[in-house]
Amino acid sequence: MIQKAIDILKSSKSVFVLTGAGISAESGVPTFRDADGLWKNYSATDLATPEAFARNPALVWEWYHWRQSIILKAAPNPAHYALVELEKKFSTFLLLTQNVDNLHRRAGSQNVLELHGNIFRARCLSCGNVQEHTIDPDNEVNNLPTCSCSGLLRPDVVWFGEPIPQDVWQQSLTFLNQTDVALISGTSGIVWPAAAIPELAKKGGIKTIEVNLESTPISPIVDISLQGKAGEILPQIVQKL
């Protein structure tokens, strides 16, 4: 099956990649949605909402700084680096990620779109300015991050109940409609709207390859479904292109 995936990519000139939490999990980054993601008895659904931030911005920022500290201890894994090498082999390439951890950029990927934002950026609630923001151990939680305009900053991520950035989604769909193959890795296939990508690709006559630890709802839809660690499968594919 891996050889079939290699053959599809060899015959392609343009590649679209979608990644999800499974790739980052191989770097030791928790998904923050399961029981292991509990923090001080709060779940992600308790804290990653506009309402939670409005009620207690200090608590939400404390959680995000904790998450940043975990991610900063992680490093890109072989799957991230394989996608960097894959990008070098195609003049037309786009990586759309559902992850907010910045690991694709740290690995060296260039053409990256972030569907759910980036945990190392913050957005001003007053002027809308977006800026880099990383944990500062000397900045106590009660000193809330603020913009140069004195407005309160919030994490530049998509919270539950918020729409995804339409410019990112439209750029992704435009590229998808013109590509030869869609490679989907480390995603459960249940988080919308990214879960629609395999079906959209199929309707457009685009070849689809899935790489995931186990079967997902999109496995019956794709042309090739490879089960196993992305950090093992993706390097094998890229090395033979």
Image: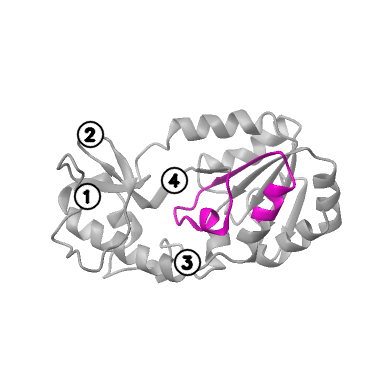
Residue at (34%, 41%) from the top-left corner? 161
Question: Any mark on residue 29, and which?
Answer: 3
Q: Which mark is residue 116?
A: 4
State left or right for residue 6 relative to residue 73.
right
Q: Earlier in the sequence, mark 2 or mark 4?
A: 4
Q: Earlier in the sequence, mark 1 or mark 2?
A: 1
The amino acid type, in three-letter code, at marker 3 is Val
Say what secondary structure mark 2 lies in.
Answer: loop
Q: What element carries label 4?
A: loop
In three-dimensional space, the C-alpha distance between marks 2 and 4, rounded to whole angstroms, equals: 21 Å
Amino acid beneath label 4: His
One can see residue 1 in this view: no
- Magenta region: 83-110
Residue 127 is marked as: 2
Label 1, label 3: how far apart the Cα atoms are: 23 Å
Residues at discs 1 and 3 in contact (Cβ within 8 Å)? no
Q: What element carries label 1?
A: helix
* Residue drawn at (66%, 29%) of the image: 177
Label ID, residue 53 = 1
Crowd around label 1: few <14 · some 14–19 · many ≥20 (10 Å): some
